[in-house]
Image (tube, rainbow, N blue to C red):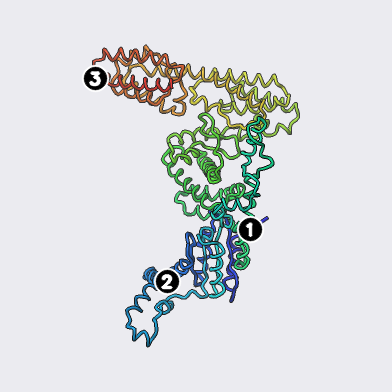
Amino acid sequence: MINYLNDEEIMTILKKYINMAKTEYAILIDGDWGTGKTYFINNVFIKYLEQDNKAFSKVSLYGITKKKEIDNKITESILEKAHPKYGKLLANTFNNIDSISSLINKAIPKSINEIVGTIDVKKLLCKLQDVDNHIIIFDDLERCNLEINVILGYINEYIENKNNKVIIIANQKEISKSKKMNNLELKYLAVKPYNKQIYSQYEKDFAQYASTFGKVKNTQDDSIEKNILDNRVLELFSEDIMYKEIKEKVIGKEIYYLPNIEQISRELSRKLECKLSKTILDNNAKEIARKMNYENHNNVRTLKLVIEKFEEITNKLEEYDIKTDNNYEKILTSILLYLLEAYIKKKKEDEIYNWTGNAEYDLQYEQHKFRFIDDMILTERVDYESVNRCLKEYSKEINSKIETNIDEPVYILKNHYFELEDDEIIKYIDEVYNKLKNKEYNKVDYPKIVYVLLIIKNLGITELEISKCINLMKINLKEINQEHTLQDDLFYSGFNIQNAEIRKEYNQIIKELEETLNTTVSIKIRKNLNDIINGEENWGQNFKSYFLSRNSYRNNIKLFLELNINNLIDVFRISKTKDIVAFRKVIYNMDISKDEVEIVKLLITELEDLVKTEQRKTQKLNFEYLIDNLNEKLKFVSS
């Protein structure tokens, strides 16, 4: 197990090293990409060097192809610090001095040259910069295009010949990866037995399967698996062997860098403009560090990205009424932590959360999840009107007694059923039944109640009472007083039910509850829609507003099954253009199901008859547009 050092401990080692009179080795700071190695060097170590007036140069080895480029970069670094105004010009001059020196010597008469000798201009200008005894920081070792033994050998010259203190920053996992594929065919030939064919495991398995039918020769005796060859190539040709040998000579101390995520989170929080965002990030710094450590993803770049997106979201939400919600701070905390989880999954190329139906959030897991965050990561688009509505619904649900009240019978059964006696379980189920009877539960709690009851049923306890509870839920759904929106969301559950029998029964019960609710809701929708389509002033705008306020289920409702077509045509005859346009805009964004096809065809026929008699020009034009819209949607259904 690696014994990680904190920033203070690393600084103690580095200070001791750079203050030694004479050293014969470099210090290597190793760590994965994005873990903040460079951030630590720039913001901690270099600040110390500057405060202590230490002479140093920091050089990136990224893309270096020649040793001379290293000298040039060091020269540039030194001269730019020593002469801020003209350092860049001096560096360019110095790095091209060989050409300049040649021109100067050619311009001097031969007779003078013979007396004074060739003038070494570079030697004269060397006094402008002095690399000896400098502290040199080499970054991006793994991104250098020189062979690893060449670059480390050259760095060693600075250590041994110029008494430089050298700090090397690298991601050792990546060193020489790109070199391993060079001349791979020749390497395979070198390690492959002469009488063996190369097969991948899949090819070998397929060949053996086919041989049972006499199609091909069985390859078991004359084949060698590709992964075995890869291991042999790695063992024989890997540059890791050369790297380890030269590293032993050059590197005296090796430090694996692991960032202090909690500390960095607090530092980054201080840079945020929004006071509430600062507070939330600071309060959750420890939890952020815990999550990143658990995922083995201590990546500062990911953390910065998460904080950037979090600030973007919080700034936008300030424009909406969700900011006045009593749970607003709790909501933003959940958003921050799920942003972190979702971006870690993306960076690790894990699968994103599998959203089902139209669910916009999920409370099942310890970390609550939000669909808009996954959508934002995938598409970079966010509909903040929808997010505002989603978060208001989320706020209502996190207030649910089932989730938070430790005395709630469903909470007790869900979290402690395995600790209870049978008679205690029966007592709590009776309490659930009575609360259902008194309509004390919100309808969105029904899936959780069903899930808990099925767990108890699976134990073989009180099946009759459980059935009575579920029947009572159906009765309650038939008697709802208000129009529910988004039927699919109401009964969506992301429960990861492992038991196949419980999962099957759960899905069946939820389906029955959905059908009961949908029937009730359909009756209310039909009444509401036909009350709106009344021919009065602004009926079309009222119709449009009705759907905009229910954006989350407009593509689930079978609108044409709910409309009174004859009434609609009668209303069209007396409607103003703006109302027809508003109606058409709603239809444009609707989907047509197979169940609605015949009714839509009937509506098209009625509209075509209406067009023949309509005298008003703009109304007639919009009826024709509406017919075209409907015909296009019918083509889509048939395809």
x, y percent for residue 131: 49, 74
Residue depth check, mark 1 versus mark 2: number of the one nearer the observer: 2
Identified at 62% across, 47% down, the residue is 294
Residue receiving disc 2: 79
Identified at 46% across, 36% down, the residue is 387
Q: Tell me which amino acid carries mark 2.
A: Leu
Mark 2, secondary structure of its residue:
helix
Q: Can residue 167 be seen in this view?
A: yes
Residue receiving disc 3: 617
x, y percent for residue 587: 38, 23
Whole-angstrom CA distance, mark 3 to mark 2, is: 79 Å
Residue 161, by quadrant, is: bottom right
Identified at 46% across, 29% down, the residue is 552
x, y percent for residue 501: 67, 25
- Residue found at the far front of this picture: 195
Whole-angstrom CA distance, mark 1 to mark 2, is: 36 Å
Instruction: State which quarter of the image contains the C terminus.
Output: top left
Residue depth check, mark 3 versus mark 2: number of the one nearer the observer: 2
> In the rendered structure, which disc, 3 or 1, sits on the residue that comes first in sequence?
1
Residue receiving disc 1: 4
Side of 420 where 542 appears, left or right: left
> In the rendered structure, which disc, 1 or 2, sits on the residue that comes first in sequence?
1
Mark 1, secondary structure of its residue:
loop
Label 3 close to label 1 by CB (< 8 Å): no
Q: Tell me which amino acid carries mark 3.
A: Lys
Side of 431 where 54 appears, left or right: left
Q: Which of 306 and 99 is in front in this view?
A: 99
